Amino acid sequence: MSDPDAGDPASDPWPDVLEWLHVAESDQRVVRLCLTADPPLRDAATFHCQQAAEKLLKGFLVQAGVHVRKTHDLDALAELVLHRFPTLDALLTPLRSWTSWSVAYRYPGEAGLEPEPSVEELSQALDVIAQLDAALRSLAPPAPDAGNP
């Protein structure tokens, strides 16, 4: 029986990884816009930090040939990524607690379960996300040499 999370090693995953990077980039842009609003839109920024991190983690899994299942659990995704990319441990640790950010400040009755992150905390989260984005982009295949067919 084959591993249900195993991808097709014969296919090039990078085009799919680029799609995950593209949507994560949009979430990062939204976070930056929310943080510059007056007053800052911390609830929306928090949600989009969680979303950007989720999409980047899924991008790493696609790169590793792992079937990406539908989940918003950043701790579970980080654990899967860590098994394949152990050097990312320091970047994965902070976002493991961000799963609740997908709903904590977006629905009536959900607010107050935990304190809303400050602008400074969200800026730090955005820095972690940018580093994770750069780490994923560093896995890009080398560009074909234009001089050699």
Image: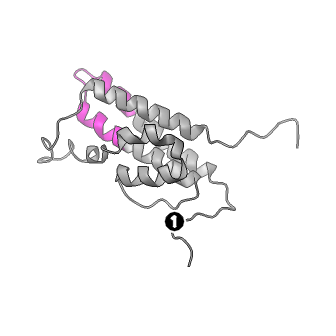
- Above or below, 111 against 28 in this view is below
- Above or below, 125 against 11 in this view is above
- Above or below, 102 against 41 in this view is below
Most extreme residue toward the right is 148
Quadrant of the image containing the C terminus: top right
- Residue 25's spot in the image, x, y percent? 47, 37
Task: Identify the magenta region.
Answer: 30-50
Position of residue 48 in the picture relative to residue 145 (left or right): left
Per the image, is 129 magenta?
Answer: no
Residue for point 42% across, 28% down:
127
- Residue 110's spot in the image, x, y percent? 15, 47
Most extreme residue toward the bottom is 1
Residue for point 55% across, 54% down:
62
- Residue toward you, 84 or 100: 84
Label 1: which secondary element: loop
Q: What secondary structure characterizes most of the magenta part?
A: helix
Position of residue 110 in the picture relative to residue 18 (left or right): left
Per the image, is 40 magenta?
Answer: yes
- The answer to whether residue 83 is seen in the rendering is yes
Local packing at callout 1 (Cα closer than 10 Å; few below 14, some 14-19, many 20+) is few
- The residue singled out by tag 1 in the image is 5
